[in-house]
Amino acid sequence: MKKNTGGYDPDVELAKGAELTASSYDKTQGAAVAAGKVTVGGKPGVAEITGIATGRAGGGIDGTINLWLSIFRFKRPDGTVNHVAGWNIMLALKAGQTALETVKGFEAYINAGTRPYKAKASGTKLAAKIEITYTEK
């Protein structure tokens, strides 16, 4: 028997979260999403970065990698609704930058930010991943 919590269903609400997308605008370093949702319940989103970067030669989007966490909302147990803002994170790459250096750059930026996300980088020079989790403050 479910406890009456004013329409709050923990299974539904904890499965909500930000959609993670990744894009590479670099000729030789790629980005892909392995797990596309960062949930309120703690399931991390995972992006994989591969290769050595050609880097950024000038202005514009060329030579960058972008991660995007979408806007979402969820209901808390007390019945209030939390609106979580989206976040577009772009890194300009340097020539010869490894995949591990790129994910460590994302990790440092995300962990230093004021948004409710934390990141963990791992991998090798040629294949690395960043795990992003939602963390209530």
Image (cartoon, rainbow, N blue to C red):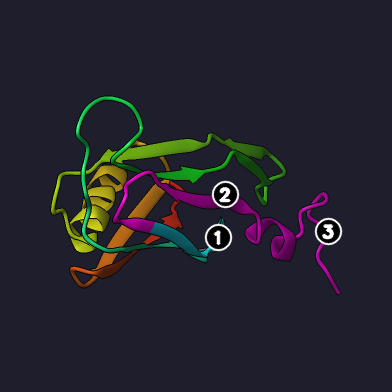
Q: Residue at x 83, y 58 (%)?
A: 4
Task: Kindly check if marks 3 and 1 are in contact, taking CB atoms under 8 A apart as contact.
Answer: no
Pick out the residue farthest to the right: 1
Residue on which the image places disc 2: 18
Mark with earlier residue (1, 2):
2
Tell me if residue 88 comes above or below residue 9 in the rendering. above
Query: For this rendering, which residue is in front, 26 or 67?
Result: 26
In magenta, the rendered stretch is 1-30
Q: Amino acid at mark 1?
A: Gly
Q: Rounded to the nearest whole Å, what is the CA distance between mark 3 and mark 1? A: 32 Å
Secondary structure, mark 2, is strand
Residue on which the image places disc 3: 4
Which label is found at residue 36?
A: 1
| 6 in the magenta segment | yes
| Front tag of 3 and 1 | 1
Q: Position of residue 60 (x, y in %)?
A: 33, 26
Tell me if residue 7 comes above or below residue 80 in the rendering. below
Query: For this rendering, which residue is in front, 110 or 34?
Result: 34
Quadrant in the picture for the C terminus: top left
